[in-house]
């Protein structure tokens, strides 16, 4: 089995985690006011090649994505242009309240250096053991493909599964006899 075949075999039980994002808590630091995170993350917008998330003051972006339930993150797709697409992407599981001042104080759960194939849509398979009980994900885009001042992200997609939790309503009380 080739690496490509094994990657698609893994993907079969993974779903796009878009439906499990808690949109009220999503944040993006250093985004352009006219080219915001929803362009790259929301369904419909992220499929439109004319819409991008763009950095503002420099090339870095810091994205915080909380989930409505605990998930297992398997892989991520981060698409962009050949020149201004993201290059070094650091992922942090369950790290809240991160800013540019403290992002380097914590070791990332995983780091991906995006290849030209990745920014065209090839998924990056993550260190699965590091993303088993994820309540939130922080994505730090450190630089871009050409070291230009602006980073442009066309699409961010997260693939994984939900963690099966016990349905407390389905449990029956055991009565003392």
Image: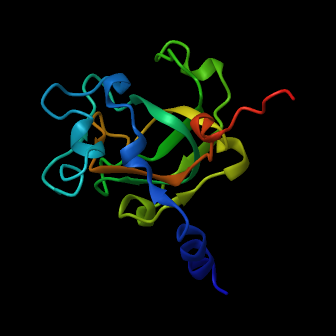
- Quadrant of image for the N terminus: bottom right
Q: Taking 152 as reference, is 32 above or below it? A: above
Residue 65, horizontal then vertical, whole percent: 43, 32
Q: Residue at x 71, y 32 (%)?
A: 173
Say how many tags the image has: 0
What colouring does the structure picture have? Answer: rainbow
Q: Residue at x 64, y 43 (%)?
A: 131
Residue 50, horizontal then vertical, whole percent: 12, 53
In front of the other: 165 or 74: 165
Q: Taking 110 as reference, is 104 above or below it? A: above
Residue 141 can be seen, yes or no = no
Q: Taking 95 as reference, is 141 above or below it? A: below
Residue 170, horizontal then vertical, whole percent: 60, 41
Q: Is residue 29 left or right of residue 142?
A: left
Q: Quadrant of residue 102?
A: top right
In front of the other: 131 or 29: 131
Instruction: Looking at this view, name the residue that lies furthest to the bottom.
Output: 1
Q: Taking 102 as reference, is 143 above or below it? A: below
Q: Residue at x 54, y 54 (%)?
A: 160
In front of the other: 13 or 3: 13
Residue 99 can be seen, yes or no = yes
Q: Quadrant of residue 134?
A: top right
Residue 79, horizontal then vertical, whole percent: 35, 55
- Quadrant of image for the C terminus: top right
Q: Is residue 170 left or right of residue 118?
A: right
Q: Residue at x 43, y 49 (%)?
A: 17
Instruction: Looking at this view, name the residue that lies furthest to the right.
Output: 177
Instruction: Looking at this view, name the residue that lies furthest to the front.
Output: 177
């Amino acid at each position: 089995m080739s690496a490509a075949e094994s990657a698609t075999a893994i993907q079969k039980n993974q779903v796009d985690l878009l439906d499990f994002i808690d949109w009220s808590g999503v944040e993006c630091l250093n985004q352009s006011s006219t080219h915001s995170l929803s362009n790259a993350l929301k369904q419909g917008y992220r499929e439109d090649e004319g819409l991008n998330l763009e950095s503002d003051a420099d090339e870095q972006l810091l994205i915080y994505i909380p989930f409505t339930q605990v998930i297992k993150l398997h892989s991520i797709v981060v698409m962009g242009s050949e020149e201004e697409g993201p290059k070094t992407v650091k992922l942090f599981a369950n790290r809240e309240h991160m800013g540019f001042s403290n992002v380097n104080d914590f070791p990332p759960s995983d780091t991906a250096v995006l290849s030209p194939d990745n920014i065209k849509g090839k998924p990056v398979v993550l260190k699965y053991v590091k993303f088993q009980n994820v309540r939130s994900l922080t994505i730090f885009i450190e630089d871009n493909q050409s070291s230009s001042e602006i980073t442009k992200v066309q699409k961010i997609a997260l693939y994984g599964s939900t963690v099966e939790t016990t349905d407390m309503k389905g449990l029956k009380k055991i009565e003392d006899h």
